[in-house]
Amino acid sequence: MAPKAAPKPKSYEEDRDATGQSSIYTASNGAPAPHPYAAQRAGQNGGLLLQDFHLIDLLAHFDRERIPERVVHAKGSGAHGIWEATEGLEDLSVAALFKKGATCPVTARFSTVGGESGSSDNARDPRGFAIKFRTPEGNFDFVGNNTPVFFLRDPAKFPHFIHTQKRHPATHLGGGDDATSFWDYLSQNPESVHQVMILMSDRGIPDGFRHMHGYYGHTIKLINKDGSWVYAQLHAISNQGIKTFTNEEAATKSPDYGQKDLYYAIENGDFPSWTIKVQTMTPEQAVDAWKNKGINVHDLTHIWPHSEYPLRTVGKFTLNTNAKNYFAEVEQAAFSPSHVVPGIEPSADPVLQSRLFSYPDTHRHRLGTNYHQLPVNQHLVENAANFQRDGPHALYNQGGRVGYLASHDPVQFAPPKQDIDKVHAPFVATAVSFLSTIRPEDFNAPRNLWNKVFSEGERERWIKTVSGHMSTVQDKEIIRRQIAIFRQVDNDIGTRLEKATGVKGYDGIKGMKFNGAHNGISATVIPANGA
Ligand code: HEM
């Protein structure tokens, strides 16, 4: 009599619980196999038999275990939890997840950006901050970073910038051994200076993933039933507070410090949580911000000052469950800014618009065309139907439902929750003509950081970090240019950096030409400590 087969997991949850479950050893076709090491041979010392499916299948599956790592954000940690809209945002958006008291499951993934999958969690690098909200209206993904601004506002620059942090094509050395490309890029693209100021500051190396804030970064639109909308910035404020490492502390930590810290905090019941807050601007306020304050809501190198656009609490998410299987639940997670729900729309920010394409595109490459059918990426909407069919690993192929819009189709169409025409009405008042024209306003927030936010001790550490980082730059011209950019922030930075690097920089960026940006700066140098 054939042995009773091991019960197949009926659900994702049962599969997650497979640990320790008593089971019967089989080949992948379910046929019982005598032992994992048993091989079929032609006699005692003879060759292996091609018919030995169990052995060949074992090796063939092993040969295919690796999938492409994420091209950026390859090293990361994740966990599951719960969202609760403690305050809600019903007056501004029809999104079900913002209804006061609404709850839904979430999955979060935190990451470094530039390093490979096995690299250190303690790099001086921004941190990725991604949360998948499984709402009753579909999945909404918050795919942000731990800094409110970014290095660029022209999406075409992203692959160039990222390549400066990948291994050199000839030497195969990474940025730790040769930072020439990194600073070469920055010295040609001054709009990066705000993010660089933050990256090189005391906030540049978070202590694990629990003690950092998350920022959506881009402006989005919150939509009401009648199609009226406001611009919004979403922030996730860590309820654990901010903790960071110095360069020296970071160097002593294990490369998997962030993973260990998050995993064991959750395992020990010390559940980390973040409060989601929102800043908003009406379309009229956005015009005023552009005309009178130099703030372009479609430019993610700038922040919205909290004093003028106050933060309002929406709710909180708490991570309370570790993945039981990292590959299935974290590596295969597919976040995308294009995963939005009714009541939330992307703005016209060109970087955001490009990301809407890039993420599903990379998921199709990394995980396959049916990536959304993987358990961790599935939505929770009941009775959902569409006309996508087949492809590799089509786990849910919608049975006998026809794959075209039939004359008597059983598929129902829900009436739109928002007035779509109004939502997509063009708004041109803040359009930028060239995506990276450098303006005097680009230096205001960095100058504020240097003069009003950093302490004297932090300024000294900043100079040490930057000059140390520049020590492997092989072309002094790059340093001369970068000093000019920092001098444009404040003379004081230029003078101190010249001393620390031993390189005399240019006086300011007036008259300089950049291969990555139009230079709209007319003043030579900003006076020291002149805010
Ligand atoms: C990951 C592209 C800008 C945050 C990724 C991935 C790609 C990508 C291809 C890998 C995704 C995967 O394999 O699952 C781009 C492009 C950008 C851009 C083309 C600009 C044009 C940004 C910005 C932010 C950001 C501005 C933050 C505000 C993230 C995060 C992840 C990620 C958090 C990791 C998501 C995860 O944990 O799976 N990006 N990115 N990216 N990106 Fe971007």
Image (tube, rainbow, N blue to C red):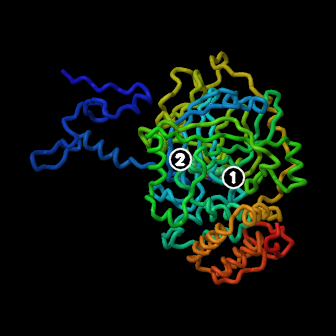
Q: Is residue 254 above or below residue 479?
A: above
> Which residue does the numbered mark 2 point to in the structure image?
365
Mark 1 element type: loop
Dot 1 or dot 2: first in sequence order is 1
Q: Nearer the viewer, residue 126 or 334?
A: 126
Mark 2 element type: helix
Q: Residue furthest left?
A: 44
Q: Amino acid at mark 1?
A: Pro
Which of the image's four quarters has the C terminus?
Answer: bottom right
Q: Amino acid at mark 2?
A: His
- In the rendered image, residue 355, in percent from the top left (x then y), is placed at 66, 48
- Is residue 332 toward the left or the right of residue 133 in the image? left
Q: Can residue 111 be seen at all in this image of the molecule?
A: yes
The residue sitting at 54% across, 68% down in the picture is: 175
The residue sitting at 59% across, 66% down in the picture is: 164
Q: Are marks 1 and 2 in contact (CB under 8 Å)?
A: no
Q: How packed is label 2: few (under 14 Cα within 10 Å), some, or many (20 or more)?
A: few
Tag on residue 265?
none
Q: Nearer the viewer, residue 57 or 510?
A: 510
Tag on residue 148?
1
Q: Is residue 413 above or below residue 450?
A: above
- Is residue 121 toward the left or the right of residue 479 in the image? left
Q: Is residue 175 above or below residue 326?
A: below
- In the rendered image, residue 54, in percent from the top left (x then y), is placed at 25, 39
Q: How packed is label 1: few (under 14 Cα within 10 Å), some, or many (20 or more)?
A: many
Q: Nearer the viewer, residue 362 or 302?
A: 302
Distance CA(mark 1)–CA(mark 2): 29 Å
- In the rendered image, residue 320, in percent from the top left (x then y), is placed at 50, 36
